[in-house]
Image (cartoon, helix red, strand yellow):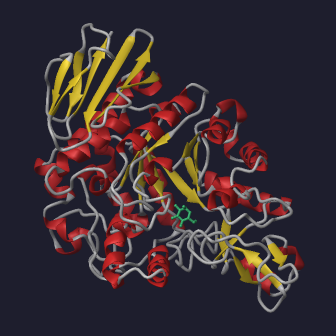
Amino acid sequence: MSFQNEVIYQAYIKSFKDSGENGYGDIKGVTSKLDYLSKLGITMLWLNPFYPSPQKDNGYDISDYTGIDPIYGTIEDFEELVEEGEKYGIGIMLDLVLNHSSTEHEWFQKALAGEKKYQDYYILREAPEGKEFPTNWQSKFGGPAWEKFGETNKYYLSLFDKTQADLNWRNKEVREELTKVVNFWIGKGVKGFRLDVINLIGKDEILIDSTGDIAQEKSLYTDRPIVHEYLQELSKNSYGKYPEIITVGEMSSTSIESCIQYTQQKNKELTMAFSFHHLKVDYSDGEKWTKAPFDFLELKKIINDWQLGLSKNGGWNALFWNNHDQPRAVSRFGDDQNYREKSATSQAHILHFLHGTPYVYQGEEIGMTNPYFEELKQYQDIESHNAYKLMRTQGKSHKEIMEILQEKSRDNSRTPMQWTSEKHAGFTKGEPWIELAKNYLQINVAKELEHGEIFIYYQNLIRLRKERKVIQLGNYEPILLEHEQVWAYQRNFEEEELLTISNFYGEEIVVDLSKDVKPGDWKYVLGNYGERSFKMNLELAPYESISFIKK
Ligand code: GLC
């Protein structure tokens, strides 16, 4: 198995399956569903953080990198998961948060207690004369990026929540400690790592004020050249020694150029990278907390630029529509009321035949939707609550904000996995930590496996990727880029050509392919309305996706 053949499934462990009654998903719950995951055909399973954590940011605030939070189980449970996974040919990918630790981590606590050694594990600075903070940077979750460091006159940098303190990668000891963490988990049989916001680890020695422009500000701590050095060093001393291990960097506000460099195999940094520009096409003026229709041409253009940029330069994309930080794509770009199944399969089709490694986020394979929470208290996410407060101060009404949260909150994808029509959708026997989407009686795994069309479609997409070199390795070429309703592209590998055409909307259309597609013996491969023959004037039903192949 090489990385080009993988399909990776993401389980947001907290919401996946509770084997007990505490209302949180857990490791044993994941193990009990390996059989289900193997039916889908995936080869690797990414688990969101399950380490001891105060859970201020759902586990992305780690207080012990080599432990397991008791709410999720024990190290023995984890060993069992790895072992069982192997039987199914499913490797386990861990999520490591190496940019910052929880302020409850022993290192931070020792630093607070005055130990100089540990104070140098974090980014501590004094505020210059006459200034409130060391720099004017804003935290990604709102408010200043600096917090007072105990009773001292210093501040510590926290680019996310104030309980997530940025680690000082300039300190060699910090790098060595974090390398040990990676090696610890490799020793437990882990086969992949997802590295959280890894392109933020390279802060400059001297930190300076931004102009106030947010893009300029991010550039002061994002994708700094030294990140490449740190990654090469980490790789050399840990995962790079094991060619089968897969790494994916989560890249915050990154660029194509940087990601080429991170993922060119010869550089020995990372296998692939997640970027997020395509999931900002429904932001108004770059602002997430707005309600705006998505810009289809922009969406296609961004994906196209990344496809071309990385595939032509030996880079590798991680492909995804959904994750635990994003609203559900079927609600966002599809029609989860009138064409839920067709829009779910159509989106999957577009993504899975692109150049890169596809990721399936839990519930996507059964067409789970946003939950449309109506009350603020239903939201658990710290980012949503901060955003609510901020929007109130900006003068938005409660109603307006609730509508924005229904579209943009990260909790939209964090509701429990819908397994059955039983109480709490079979997710837990206790009280779930977050409410379920009300539609679990209609949308759940049991129903889907009985008579749904989405799960089967994912199975087919995944099977075809494993079978066809053109899907794994083929060149990517766009067609009909300016078309306002249709998404289409071609892939070529040796003599083989693959053509994918998709109607991204709910209105039928006839698309003229004669200018863009060479005639020939195009054979049907897969489509979400079933088999039919190729025509230069191709009619597409609502949310129809179809692929043809030519040899
Ligand atoms: C990543 C995670 C997100 C988390 C943040 C800070 O973006 O995916 O959930 O809040 O990093 O660790």
Q: Position of residue 325 (x, y in %)?
A: 45, 62
- When asked about the image quadrant of residue 282, the answer is bottom left
> Taking 342 as reference, is 519 above or below it?
above
Q: Evaluate whether residue 16 shows in this view.
A: no
Q: Position of residue 464 (x, y in %)?
A: 32, 28
Q: Residue, x 67% and y 45% (percent of image)?
A: 239
In this view, the residue in front, 168 or 26, is 168
Q: Report the label total.
A: 0
Left or right placement of residue 224 versus residue 399 in this view: right
> Taking 164 as reference, is 350 above or below it?
above
Q: Position of residue 108 (x, y in %)?
A: 74, 78
In this view, the residue in front, 482 or 237, is 482
Considering the image in quadrants, where does the C terminus appear?
Answer: top left
Q: Residue furthest left?
A: 451
Q: Residue furthest bottom?
A: 151
Quadrant of ligand 1 in image: bottom right
Left or right placement of residue 514 versus residue 507 in this view: right
In this view, the residue in front, 443 or 338, is 338
Left or right placement of residue 508 versus residue 222 in this view: left
Q: Position of residue 362 (x, y in %)?
A: 35, 56
Q: Evaluate whether residue 496 shows in this view.
A: yes
Q: Residue, x 46% and y 31% (percent of image)?
A: 355
> Taking 493 as reference, is 176 above or below it?
below
